[in-house]
Amino acid sequence: MDFPDGLLYTKEHEWVKVENGKAKIGITDYAQHELGDIVFVEFPEVGSGVVAMEPFGVVESVKTVSDLYSPVSGEVVGVNSELEATPEVVNTSPYDKGWMVEVAMSDKNELKELFSADEYTKYVEEESQ
Amino acid sequence: MRYIPNTDKENKEILDSIGVKSVEGLFSSIPDSLRLKNPLSNIPHAMSEPEVLRHMKGMSKKNADLDSHISFLGAGAYNHFIPSVVHHIISRSEFYTAYTPYQPEISQGTLQAIYEFQTLICQLTGMEVANASMYDGASALAEAVLMAHRINGRKEVFLSRGIHPEYRQVVHTYCRYLGITLKEIPFSEKGIIDLEWLSKNISENTSAVAVQNPNFFGCVEDMADIEKLTHASDAIFIYCISEPISLGILKSPGDFGADIVVGEGQGLGNPVSFGGPYLGLFATREKYIRSMPGRLVGRTVDANGKTGYVLTLSTREQHIRREKATSNICSNQALCALSATVYMALMGKEGFKKLSILNLQKTNYAKELLSNIKGYKLKFKNPIFNEFVIETPVSPDEINKNLLKEGIMGGLNLEKFYPELKNCMLICVTENHRKEDIDRLWKLLKQY
């Protein structure tokens, strides 16, 4: 299982990559593995406001459906519309081509609440036991 | 004889373990004055099988049904001829179940039948996707209103007063605690939607406009004008049908720009049967598929490239999505949908059209004949399909009481649902009425 350093992680298995005050968000390798073949991602509207740890999207796989939680508060500034036609990219490239939403953060302090790669690795190990 | 398998010894053990002395002791909390002192005395003695049959047949003979009577009742339940092959096919043991398959993929035949049902409903309505069916027309309409709210988040819905009154009642029940405001669009003197009222009241807060066509009075609505008004406000256009045979002659809802088409499918090969079970139809545009309620069967290929049928987009449903599901329906009207499928396949495109024309012609014959009787008047001067409203010189209830003595069920007294429509009778004529049946009604109505 791959949890790259430099990213931040949530208990709901999203990752965050912070670049120029913006947070790029996707789901982790563990999450895509647990969900199975992903067939649909429902995004929030660009321009809409999001609140940390509240659902703002939906990831649907062949066997289940799961809410997408925003790790940070702010405004949605971009969504990965490539996933509408090729949602399977989330399975093959969860940290790169499979990114989902980009949020302009309103409170950077919220990042302190998130896991580092090491902490998340430990969390996943505990959870899967 | 009572079928309680416990022995006296077991009963005693049960009572001992809960600390009660006797079975009678379990009822000690019920005040004495409320207890039944004597055994039920008015229940007759047990009957043998032949006695039960004789008894039940005797009771069923008291029913006035379509074998014993000529009926001019429509109003959401339509007396169409059902070819014998429909019953023959649905009675096959492989098919004969009321239920949606719960272990779906092993029931390939049932799934294929549902897939074909969906395909036929799409062809009939001119829509892109139809579900496996709902409970009935009323619940399908209610689900459409909820779906529109899911799509645009708006909270005000306009329902035409020409929608079947019982459908509207069900919509009110569904929406009661959801914060959705329902407003009813009045009808004009022509018996169709008051367009002026709608254009004045529709706004960017309007989630959906729902219209039944032909409406409850049998009148054909100006769906093109209603569509324009609805979409000008970016609202969802819900097209409701209570008489599906009308689709053989009217432009399809899809061509009219409907976003959601719902309706009652009873008219398609299902008997009126004292009110049920009926069949809800539900179709929409592909772009709204993930907001749609109900089961959906898809066709695919298996690992060996062979055609197979599967329940698809199940993640909309409550067994997966729980409280966030698009609906709490987790079944369909499998057997009624199968009847409709066999019926539609049997009629074919041409047969269906001919049937519609036959209904139209016979109804217009009746309309001309009855509205020209002295003292009677056609209530709404508007094109109709197979129902129309006439004003009667005396109460329809009085007329119907006398017609019944002649073996005829007259039309519906509209005052029951529309207090302002006093002495108005809704009459339905289908291909099942012979000319002499209509002439007989004419003769009997002339007596007033």
Image (tube, rainbow, N blue to C red):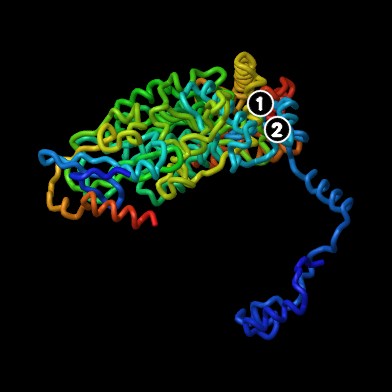
Label 2, secondary structure: give it.
helix
Using the rendered image of the protein, determine whether residue B361 is visible from the camera's viewpoint.
no
Is disc 2 in contact with disc 1, using a CB cutoff of under 8 Å? yes
Which amino acid is tagged 1? Val
In the foreground, A70 or B41: A70
Rendered-image quadrant of the C terminus of chain B: top right
Label 1, secondary structure: give it.
helix
Q: Which mark is residue B90?
A: 2
Count of picture labels: 2
In the foreground, A125 or A113: A125
Q: CA distance from mark 2 to mark 1?
A: 8 Å
> Image quarter for residue B116?
top right
Q: Residue at x 57, y 25 (%)?
A: B304
In this image, B441 relative to A109: left or right?
right
Q: Which residue is mark 1?
A: B342
Taking the view exactly as shown, the residue that stands out farthest to the left is A20
